[in-house]
Amino acid sequence: METGPTGLATHEAEARLLIYGPNRLPTQASKPLLWVFLANFTHLMALLLWVGGIIGFIAQMPQLAIAIWAVNLINGLFSFWQEFRAERAAAALRALLPAQARVLRDGVVQEVPRETLVPGDLLVLAEGDLIAADGRLIEAAELRVDQATLTGESRPVPKHCEAYAETTSERAALPNLVFTGTTVVAGTAKALVFATGARSAFGQIAQLTEGIAETPSPLQQELAQLTRVVTVIAVSMGVIFFVLAVGVARVNLAESLIFAMGMIVAFVPEGLLPTVTLALAIGVQRMARRNALVKRLSAVETLGCTEVICTDKTGTLTQNAMTVRQIWAAGRMFEVQGGGYAPVGAIVVDGQPVAHDDDLTALLRAAALCNDARLLAPNGEYDWTILGDPTEAALLVAARKAGLDLEAELQHAPRIHEIPFESRRKMMSSIHQPGQRVVYVKGAPNEVLAHCVALRMNGALRPLDAALLDEMTTIKDGLARSGLRVLGVAQRDLASNCDLSSAAAIEADLTFLGLIAMYDPPRPEVAAAVAQCHQAGIRIIMITGDDGLTATTIAQRLHIVASPQPRMISGSELAQLDERALADALQDEVVFARVAPEQKLRIVNALQQLGKVVAVTGDGVNDAPALKQADIGVAMGRSGTDVARESADMILTDDNFATIVHAIEEGRAVYANIRKFVSYIFTSNVPEAVPFVLFALTGGRIPLALTVMQILAIDLGTDMVPALGLGAERPEPGLMARPPRRRSDHIISRGLLVRALAFLGMIQGAVAMLVFFSIYWSQGYAGQWLDLPADGHIYQVATTATLAAIVATQIGNLFAQRTERASILAINPFTNRLIWIGIGIEILLIFAISYVPWLQWIFGTAALPASSWLLLLACVPVLLIADEIRKAVGRA
């Protein structure tokens, strides 16, 4: 590396930065801004409107063409602005590695931006540092590193700077290397940087996730389908009415083109994409207020169709605040009182406080010394806190409650050697020398007992025979079934000539001291969230690295599983299952325990092969592929790593399972709001089409009750803002009592079409035509249906009244569409300000179109008599009342 003891010179570091590039993790390249901008003007519906404008110019109606193009332009700009804001918000989530790093340069320790680290730098590390590059240790003093972000193992790993014969392909297992994204738990060190950015172990895992293609979300697929359906309907209606106008009504070619364009414009929901974007953006804002940060707008709706949540246990379902509850020592079960990390609370046996017990003290002394965590006292700003693994910290708290002075104990018996915890051994040992050397061991009870030959009982040693082993196993299983995490503790006095390089020699012939059982309480809000998931038809699968009995008990306690004996699949058992066996297992209630993070990807794939929409939680680097593969990847904001957050679609700032459920509710609301918009728009398509149908079928004997420009006034004017308001609706009552929508479900369903077109639309069409005829009847044409004047003032008043009738009934329809199944009386009518703003704009527009002279000229309208407004006022509640009756029948 050509680095001296004083580190790199500043100019050399700058030169290497040009060669190796910034110390950044690889990120997916975003689409160029120009492409995003143009995409909002070149999708199928936008192209249809551009063509509609061209037809307007051909038909010599430039004002019509300009109006269509103007709305298309406004829609595109609005959608682009929302996407741009969303991208900016996502970019703000990426500053997750340490901003500064300490290095030795020019012989001086200095802080430099993390991105400027280069191979050859001397990285200076201290307790609490987040390591910003891969390095080879050249100095180390009592260094312990938490490599959970890289390996998934939460226990700190001791590190040293001695040379090591590499016999493993896993670099993370080498004790003289440190890695990007890991944390210094204790000690100090200097490391020679040898890899940065994408070349680091952290970066290489990040690059693996780039190989998993990002599939379109269900909403993106649905919008593509909706666009195709709407285009076919619009073009078909245009062609049909063109043929009817030319062949049946004998209308000239130019006017027939205008009729055709009118139908196309009528059936194109011009405000769909802006409404979708607005609904998603509002969903993102609401979710952010509930501690869920969404990186992709379309991910909001994907949450709404989630069928399965694969969740961690520790820290997501539970509080990750371990507390020792029970201790078994010398044949007695001790209860530990108090909670949290404050060492306050008594230790009792048979209801009586224990002042002192030699066997209990020996057990807790061993647990406290064979420990890498630290308990930090309050400093005025913070309460009791910990540094290190919560499980080990809980042991320190219990020792303090028993009256042990931890600092004095460590000073009396300093640690001289350690055999770190490994997932293969499931044990940790530390050697201390208070005089004679002694080894303390803690770990999984079965593993510790396998190395023991005796049991400490009332200060004496009792041979550990088969009967005692069975008793220990029964006690351990009973504690685990109570939802407690159980550790076994042992010790042994070592001979002066014991080979400290041999774990087998050190950990042989141990004396078992007892069992320590600790509780990680479930988050108080999780039980209600789980119940809400069940009600909503969402399945929860727990995937944890914890003990199977403990995991199963917690799953039962939180009602994640209902069976008294659900299947528990361990990581080793999972490795033996083929894909068919795994798929069969996933059909029933199951808990996955002792599962490695990389095995999550296989479970997610299996669920997706079964056709499920899957959300998965994760926080470590090894979780990233599963987060990327899932339909919704959910990373932890507090404990999550940079790679996990980059791979995820959503970040929980509180690491809380209940937040996922809130997000699912918002996602369902977004989809429901898009359906409300489509239903609202489609309803008014019927009264827009009815006048053309009657005109064509009667050969022009019934005049057109609406002109093409008046149709545009509805679609691009009076309907637009109220429809956008539906995109801001809150979740309606009962939304989470419905099952998730299937992948095969479409926004435009048969039920939506029946409601919007056959039911509400037909009623609205009938009301509009009755208002049209009523104008003629009030002017001396009583009872006459055919051969009415098709021009002049009376015709303009009649078409204006028809336009106003559609607007009036759409106001009632707007309130009807706010809920799909629940009564409108079940919601607060004032929670959506956009609805009321839309109604205000709608009323202003219809008055302006009716009375402002230049708008009368453009739209062919005339001032309405006062008596007509009374009739129009009566039209407002018609659709609301009709739909309330429909909803009541549906709920019955």
Image (tube, rainbow, N blue to C red):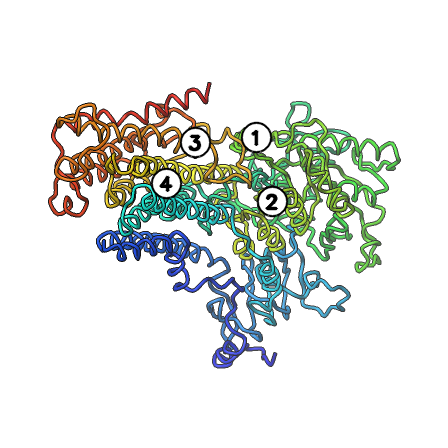
User: Tag on residue 390?
Assistant: 2
Q: Quadrant of residue 721?
A: top left
Question: Is residue 442 visible in the rendered structure shown here?
Answer: no
Q: Which residue is mark 4?
A: 727
Q: Nearer the viewer, residue 810 or 118?
A: 810
Q: Nearer the viewer, residue 712 or 426?
A: 712
> Dot 3 lies on which element?
helix
Q: Which residue is mark 1?
A: 534
Question: Is residue 848 visible in the rendered structure shown here?
Answer: yes
User: Tag on residue 764?
Assistant: none
Residue extending farthest top: 892
Q: Is residue 543 left or right of residue 739?
A: right
From the image, which quarter does the N terminus lie in? bottom right
Going from N to C along the chain, the mark reached first, 1 or 2, is: 2
Going from N to C along the chain, the mark reached first, 2 or 3, is: 2
Going from N to C along the chain, the mark reached first, 3 or 1, is: 1
Nearest to the eye among marks 1 and 2: give it: 1
Mark 2 and mark 4: Cα distance apart in space: 44 Å
Estimate how packed mark 4 is, as few (under 14), some (14 to 19) or many (20 or more) residues with alpha carbons within 10 Å. Answer: many
Q: Which residue is mark 3?
A: 754
Nearest to the eye among marks 3 and 1: give it: 3
Nearest to the eye among marks 2 and 4: give it: 4
Residue 231 at x, y percent in the picture = 42, 48
Mark 3 and mark 1: Cα distance apart in space: 30 Å
Going from N to C along the chain, the mark reached first, 4 or 3, is: 4
Residue type marked 4: Gly
Residue 270 at x, y percent in the picture = 34, 47
Estimate how packed mark 2 is, as few (under 14), some (14 to 19) or many (20 or more) residues with alpha carbons within 10 Å. Answer: many
Mark 1 and mark 4: Cα distance apart in space: 27 Å
